[in-house]
Amino acid sequence: MKHVRSLFAQRVIDAIMRVPVGTVATYGQIAIMAGNPRGVRGVVWILHSSSGHAGLPWHRIVNRHGKISLKPGDGYEEQKYLLLSEGVRFDSEDRIDLNRFLWRPE
């Protein structure tokens, strides 16, 4: 049986797939790119439900404050490790400098 995605879900997936190595995007940024500025929770759900089978670079999506939203012991460490391995750096408060690392698509 073929999996049917909404247009919004497909646009979210397409946007996430475009985030380059060594950069991050915010949930809100992805929602805007997918055509629904109020669709942040939808982005979260799509990441949660589709990251594995869609092969999404889920670790590159962070909150608007430049922080990882996952809790310690629930994926936080893995996401931070993956970002660090791509050259993304964190300050002493575990925040990413969005002026430096935020993806700015042309």
Image (cartoon, rainbow, N blue to C red):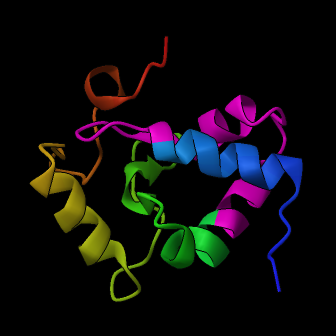
- Along the viewing direction, whichever of 8 and 24 lies nearer the viewer: 8
Q: Quadrant of residue 33?
A: top right
From this view, report whether residue 101 is shown above or below residue 42. above
Point out residue 73 in the picture as x, y percentages from the top left corner: 34, 89
Residue 30 in which image quadrant: top right
Q: Is residue 13 left or right of residue 18?
A: right
Mark yes or no: residue 38 visible. Answer: yes
Compared across the picture, whether 42 is left or right of 58 comes to right
> Can you see residue 65?
no
Task: Determine whether, in the image, residue 36 is placed left or right of residue 48.
Answer: right
64 with respect to 23 (left or right) = right
For the point 49% across and 46% down, the residue is: 17
Q: Which quadrant would the N terminus be assigned to in this image?
A: bottom right
Which x, y percent locates residue 5? 83, 63
Q: Residue at x 66, y 77 (%)?
A: 49
> Which stretch is magenta?
18-46
Task: Answer above or below: position of 104 versus 91.
Answer: above
Q: Nearer the viewer, residue 67 or 45?
A: 45
Q: Is residue 38 above or below residue 99?
A: below
Q: For the image shown, how many numbered marks are present on the structure? A: 0
Residue furthest to the top in view is 106
Q: Magenta stretch containing residue 34, yes or no?
A: yes
Residue closest to the far front: 1
Q: Is residue 30 inside the magenta stretch?
A: yes
Residue 21 screen position, x and y as percent: 26, 41
Q: Nearer the viewer, residue 11 or 35?
A: 11
User: Which residue occupies 23% across, 54% down?
Assistant: 83
Q: Position of residue 84 (x, y in %)?
A: 14, 54
Residue closer to the observer: 12 or 23: 12
